[in-house]
Amino acid sequence: MNEQKPIKFNNDVDCLVDYNELEKAIIWYQEKPTASNKKIYMFGNYPAVSIHNEKVHVHRLLMTYWLKTKIPTEYSVHHINHNKLDSRKENLSLVLNSAHNSAHMKGVKFSSDHRKKIGEANKRRKGIRMKKRHNIPVQELNDLLKYGFSILAISELYGVDWTTIKSRIYENPELLED
């Protein structure tokens, strides 16, 4: 298919959307012509369309099209009337995640049992954690660097994160001389 045919939409989820704007957004977003029939379906909690096997939420696709740029990860597309099926231009706004989350959580009170569960879940969560200090002798580190070991290889040898080795090297400027 070398030429893009007009797109017809099958909207089974009753998404409120301007089909002309959605068609323009899809054509702008895609790299090559796509199917002329598009189904709007629920993907998670939001209406979406598929563009070359990529599932794209309608509200994010439209906002990306209107701004002509990728939406930074620290921003959310907010439905002003809180209706997730309403993707009309007048109902969408771009807001910082922190403001968006706090607006949705305003007035919510958690029970002590729920707060306890959140605390336990956060302890199990992967990501940034305070790590205990590892004692890596400077002379051993110096020898491994002289033998050509990479920072990653040294970190695996000691069972620590590579950032620990890197910070140990910068704490000891004599290791940087070679």
Image: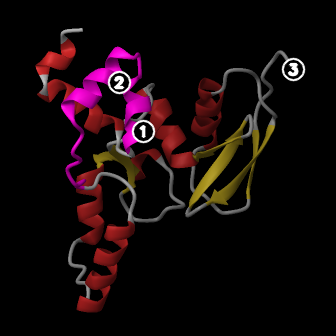
In this orientation, which residue lies closer to the viewer: 138 or 36?
Answer: 138
Residue type indicated by callout 1: Leu
Residue shown at the point (33%, 15%) measured from the top left = 146
Question: Residue 62, percent across and down?
Answer: 51, 39
Report, in whole angstroms, how far the alpha carbon at label 2 lies from the one at label 3: 57 Å
How many C-alpha atoms fall within 10 Å of the one at disc 2: few (<14), some, or many (≥20)? Answer: some
* Circles 1 and 2: CB atoms closer than 8 Å: yes
| Residue bearing mark 3 | 1
Report, in whole angstroms, how far the alpha carbon at label 1 lies from the one at label 2: 10 Å
Q: Vertical placement of 156 versus 110: above or below?
A: above
Secondary element type, mark 1: helix
Which one is in front in this view, the residue at disc 1 or the one at disc 3?
1
Which one is in front in this view, the residue at disc 2 or the one at disc 3?
2
The residue range painted magenta reads 130-158
Question: Residue 149, percent across and down?
Answer: 41, 22
Residue shown at the point (61%, 30%) measured from the top left = 24
User: Image check: 173 left or right of 114?
Assistant: left
Can residue 143 be found in the magenta stretch? yes
Secondary element type, mark 3: loop
**Which of pointers 2 and 3 lies earlier in the amino acid sequence?**
3
**Which of pointers 1 and 3 lies earlier in the amino acid sequence?**
3
Q: Vertical placement of 115 versus 91: above or below?
A: below
In this orientation, which residue lies closer to the viewer: 71 or 116?
Answer: 116
How many C-alpha atoms fall within 10 Å of the one at disc 3: few (<14), some, or many (≥20)? Answer: few
* Res 125 quadrant in image: bottom left
**Which of pointers 1 and 2 lies earlier in the amino acid sequence?**
2
Q: Residue furthest right?
A: 1
